[in-house]
Image (cartoon, helix red, strand yellow):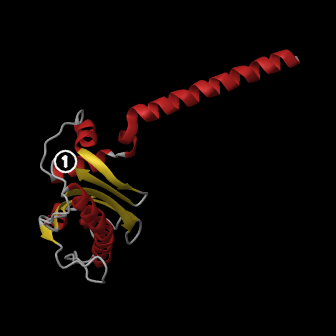
Amino acid sequence: MSKASIKKELGFVMILSFVCALLLGGTRVAIGERAELSDTTVFAVWDILQKNKDAETSYQSFINEFASLKSSSKLRLWRYNAEPSIVACEATGSGMWNEITAVFVINAMKRQIIGLRITEQNETAGLGSEIASKEFCEQFLIKSFNELEVTSEAKLEVDAITGATESSKSVERLLNKALRTILPLSEQSDGSSNGGKNG
């Protein structure tokens, strides 16, 4: 193989790599936030808010109707544009065996959880896995967290599932940690967007 043909092949590989990088970058820009949203998160938020969205429009509706407040590997927050006191949250934390991901929506002004869904868990089947059940999640329907002090050890308490206390307590810890992050952020945003008025 001659030097000229090696240079030609290397040039082709470099051009091909550059084109692929451009295509990937363009795809990322075109998809935007949708790439970071999971199906389960989007559908869980709409389900909690009792808004019927079909699979084709759910992502675009979410992107249009929610603004990102915070995004990290363990906690992601979005404010509902139509009602700024409504904040959607995806929080991930340690369960008994593996990580648990909860999606919940709060009304920060009323200090209430509107609803919660466990979207990912690998707890013991038939015991800890019940944290994803409708019955467990129903305890969070319009659950008040007025007693929660973001700077103290006061806690939002969760009714544990018999035989799955540790998994239930993992959800409790996850919620309390997330709420301590959400409340200061939502209060700052409310103050700036509502001229400092409190509800």
Residue 172 or 187: which is nearer the viewer?
187
Quadrant location of residue 162?
A: bottom left
Which quadrant holds the C terminus?
bottom left
* Residue displayed at 70% across by 20% down: 12
Report x, y in % for residue 61: 23, 38
In the drawing, does residue 135 fall left or right of residue 62? Answer: left
* Residue displayed at 47% across by 29% down: 26
* Residue displayed at 25% across by 42% down: 62
In the displayed structure, 40 sits above or below 158; it is: above
Q: Residues within 10 Å of mark 1 (few under 14, many from 20)?
A: some
Q: Secondary structure at mark 1?
A: helix
In the displayed structure, 22 sits above or below 189; it is: above
Instruction: Answer yes or no: is residue 121 visible.
Output: no
Report x, y in % for residue 29: 43, 34
Which quadrant holds the N terminus?
top right
Give the farthest residue toward the bottom.
153
* Residue displayed at 63% across by 28% down: 17
Give the farthest residue toward the right.
2
Report x, y in % for residue 187: 25, 65
Give the farthest residue toward the front.
195
Q: Which residue is mark 1?
A: 46
* Amino acid found under the numbered disc labelled 1: Trp
In the displayed structure, 39 sits above or below 170; it is: above
Report x, y in % for residue 105: 21, 58
Instruction: Answer yes or no: is residue 79 visible.
Output: yes
